[in-house]
Image (spheres, grey):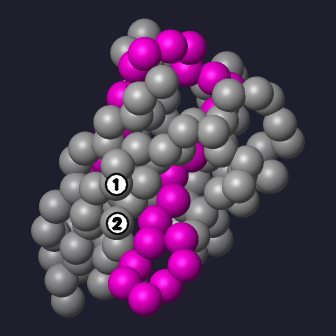
Amino acid sequence: VQLQASGGGLVQAGGSLRLSCAVSGGTFGSSMGWFRQAPGKEREFVAVVRWSGGVTYYADSVKGRFTISRDNAKNTVHLHMNSLKPEDTAVYYCALRMNRIVLTYLANADYYDYWGQGTQVTVSS
């Protein structure tokens, strides 16, 4: 299974970006999440969505600004990021969980089976 993340870039504060993560090489599991890691900080949870039913869960820091969605036909998950802030600057990673689990557990990176390569998001003030 391979995950290919794309869509990062440089944007001004208040702007928007859309990240995408395409899954290939096998079944697409039960849930897809996004994490981010800023320089000098630990990786942190951003959002997760179930492939079946589309149930979502967000970190408090992005709730109301970010939206995670999935396109089952294309095996792709998107992260729509609005009202971006400089503190959103980080490398963003998508991750795939194969077996179903309580969604809130997926705020923990240890529960994911596969990871994408990361895409840089930089928000200027």
According to the picture, the residue beneath numbered tag 1 turns out to be 118
Left or right: where 113 falls relative to 86 = right
Does the stretch in magenta take in 80? Answer: no
Percent x, y of residue 24: 40, 19
Q: Quadrant of the C terminus?
A: bottom left
Circle 1 SS class: loop
Q: Residue at x 41, y 29 (%)?
A: 2
Q: Amino acid at mark 1?
A: Gly
Query: Is residue 85 in view?
Result: no
- The alpha-carbon separation of the residues under discs 2 and 1 comes to 6 Å
Circle nearer the N terminus (2, 1): 2
The answer to if 34 sits in the magenta stretch is yes
- Write the residue at 34% across / 66% down: 91
Who's the residue at 35% across and 72% down the image?
A: 90
Q: Quadrant of residue 16?
A: bottom left
Q: Residue 74: where, in percent of width, then height?
A: 37, 15
Residue 29, image quadrant = top right
On the rendered structure, is 87 left or right of 99? left
- The residue under the point 34% across, 54% down is 118
Disc on res. 91: 2
Residue 114: percent from the left, percent from the top? 54, 39
Q: Are marks 2 and 1 in contact (CB under 8 Å)?
A: yes
Secondary structure beneath dot 2 equals strand
Mark 2 is on which residue type?
Val
**On residue 107, which mark appears?**
none
Q: Which residues are magenta?
A: 17-43
Q: Is residue 107 above or below residue 6?
A: below
